[in-house]
Structure formats: C-alpha cells, structure tokens
Image: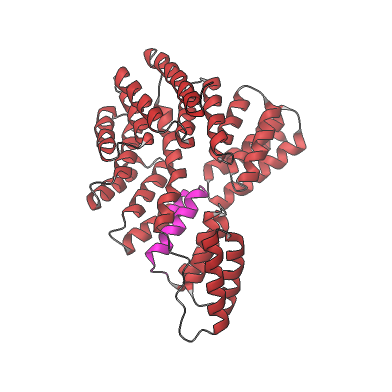
Amino acid sequence: MLSACQADSNSLFHSTHSLKQMAVHKQSLLVFSTLLVAGFAVAAPQIALSAETSVEVEVKPQNNSDLDALLRQGREFVDSGDYSKAIAIYQEAARLDTENPRIFAGIGYLEARQGNYQASVEFYQQAIGLEPNNADFQYALGYAMANLQNYPAAATAYRRAAALDRKNVNARIGLGVVLFQQKDYSGSFKAYQEAIALDPKNWQAYSSMGLVLIQQGNFASAVTVLQEAAQLAPKQAGVQLKLGTALLRAGYTSEGLAAFEEAAQLEPRNPEVQLEIGGLLQAQKDLDGALVAYQRAIAVRPNLVEAHAGIGRIQLEKQDFLGAITTFRRVIKLAPNRAEAYYNMGTALKARDQKSEAMEAFQQALNTYRQQGNNEGVQKSEAALREMK
C-alpha cells in the first residue's frame, strides 16, 4: 500500500504529465502568473507577522497595578495560543489606558492572526491615531488592508511605512504585491527593485519580480530573475513553480517541466504547492486535475480558503451549481469578508432560479466590495443586480 507521501508524489507526477501535454500544445500559462501572485499575497502575512509589532506593550510608570496585571494575564493567554481570551483582556486594558497605542496594536495583531482583518484594521487605525509615525503600525495596516483586498489603501499604508523606515524591505515587497493586483506593473517592478537594492539576497523580491516580468511578457528576463531566486532559495517549491512557468513560456519545455518536478519533490505535502498547481491546471482548463490538487491541499489544511474557492470556481464552470452553492457558503463561513465568494454564490443561485437568494448574495457582494474600495467588483455586482430586476 502506498504511503501518503508516495500517493502525493504520484498525483503530482500525474499533474506534471498533464502539464507536459499542455506545454507541447503551447497553451498559455500567462493566467497562472496572476494566480501565483495571488498565492504570494496570501502567503505574505507570514512576512508581515514576523515584522509586526509585538503584543508586549510598554507600561507607563503612572499606570496602576490593575493594568499591569491585565497585561501580564493577556501575555499568558497569547503564550498559550488562546487569542480570543487575550483580545478580551487587552480590550479591558485599553479601557484603562486609552492613550497607549501598543495595546491597540497588540489587539490588531491578534485579530490578524485569527484572520479577522476588518477588526485588525480598526485597531491598527486607533494605534496610528495615537502614534502616526510608527512604521510597524503602518506596515501592519497595509497587511490587513491587503487581505481585505483593499489594495489602494494597502498601497498607501505600505508607502507610508517605507517612508518612515527607509530600510523596511518588507514594506516594499508588500507594496509590490498590491500594486501588481492593481495592474500597476511598472510600479510593482520598481518596488521590488528597491527591495533588492536594500537586500540583494532577498529571494522573495526576486521571485515576485519574476511574476511581473511574466505578466509583461518578458519571459527571458523572468527566467533570469527567477533563477536568481532559486539560487538564493533552492528549497522553495514556490520559486520552482514560478520558474517552471517562465521557462515554459520562454519555450524551454523540458526545463520548465523539470522545475515543476523539483517543486513536487521539495514539498509533496505542502498545501500551498498543491494550491498553485491547482491554479495552473485550472487556468489550463484541466478541471479534474485542478480539483485533485485543491482537494489534496484541503486534506492537509482543511480551512485553506483559496483551495475551497478554487473548487467552487470549478463547480461553477462544470455547472454543478448546487455543489458551488455549498462550497461558497463554506468559503464565506471561513472568510466572511470575501466579496468574490458572495458574487460567485449569487451566480450559482441565479443559475438555479433562486432569485431572491441570488439577489441577496449579489447585494452582499456589492456591500463588501464597496467597503473594500474595489470599484471593479462594485460595477460587476451592480450589473448582476440590474439583470435580476
């Protein structure tokens, strides 16, 4: 009987074989570059969290013993991983000391750790109101805004963080990611250039720069940049996936497939790798192969929102509308601020002639897009609602 890892390797080999067939037919891989950068944006919180302000707050000498006790108790809950109780304690501390920005920032940090990005934004904004020139607060606000897909606001916060801390490499990487999402490729490229100038060995910056070059159609340069990233980070499967994309687009079929195989061997049980393979296969209309990859990602990480959303999109494309409705309800439960999930659920409900439920979903999508400042999403949701009337 095959072990779990062997089964994963066989599945990845099957997916790679499908990729080879597609490469031979010279089908486009450009869509995957967008999916990959979306994957990078999802992974970016790990960078942000390492640079965010600590929940350990500075207690002013005049603060009373009750506050000191609350802060110690909150720290204990953080150390034990009970973030909900820690947040409740820090909120009580904030009521005792309304002028300490680090308490609000600490709550923002914990909310972000739990995926509550809207709440995180609100607390970081309170911290920034008290200490507007704190680069860490601005950077963390950018991270939370990016996860809400409010890319213009995220870009503003990242720029502010970079201006306040001119050596902040991660702020420039974050800026590059959100500018890419806004299709400002020249701005994104410049942000990554600045990051590399500050840290020439930063493989994340090279990796992301490679995606910009792929999007711009400069595949030869993308290969060069991504090979640099691979040299700096030879154990990063995600880099190999991006390099494989660039190589295939540049016409180097065997080398591109070798990069994908390397990614599979490096991290056969990594859900992020499976997620990106799923995105690639889905972009190439290999829906069955993509579904296997997404399901394998969920088997390792059951609450991986992007994988569930990918399955929902496949179900829509296969006209499995009932399945799509169930899946997008799951996505919304995991990520209530995900506007696209409401929109897609509305599409599925509309296809099943569930008009009132569809209108409710489209309206929720519209409201969420508005809150996030996503004008494109607002326009398509308004169009969907007009069609329903």
Residue 117 image position (x, y, % from top left): 54, 54
Residue 262 image position (x, y, % from top left): 35, 27
Report the side of 325 relative to 133 (left or right): right
Residue 71 image position (x, y, % from top left): 53, 73
In which quarter of the view is residue 216 placed? top left
From this view, report whether residue 273 is shown above or below residue 113.
above
Question: Is residue 135 magenta-colored?
Answer: yes
Report the side of 136 relative to 220 (left or right): right
Question: Is residue 259 magenta-colored?
Answer: no
Q: Quadrant of the C terminus?
A: top right
- Residue at 31 percent of width and 57 percent of height: 168
In which quarter of the view is residue 166 placed? bottom left
Report the side of 6 relative to 315 (left or right): left
For the question of whether residue 182 can be seen, the reply is: no
- Residue at 53 percent of width and 60 percent of height: 110
In which quarter of the view is residue 385 placed? top right
- Residue at 47 percent of width and 28 percent of height: 5
In-front residue for pair 300/42: 300
In-front residue for pair 11/312: 11
Q: Quadrant of the N terminus?
A: top right
Task: Tell me the magenta residue range.
Answer: 132-154
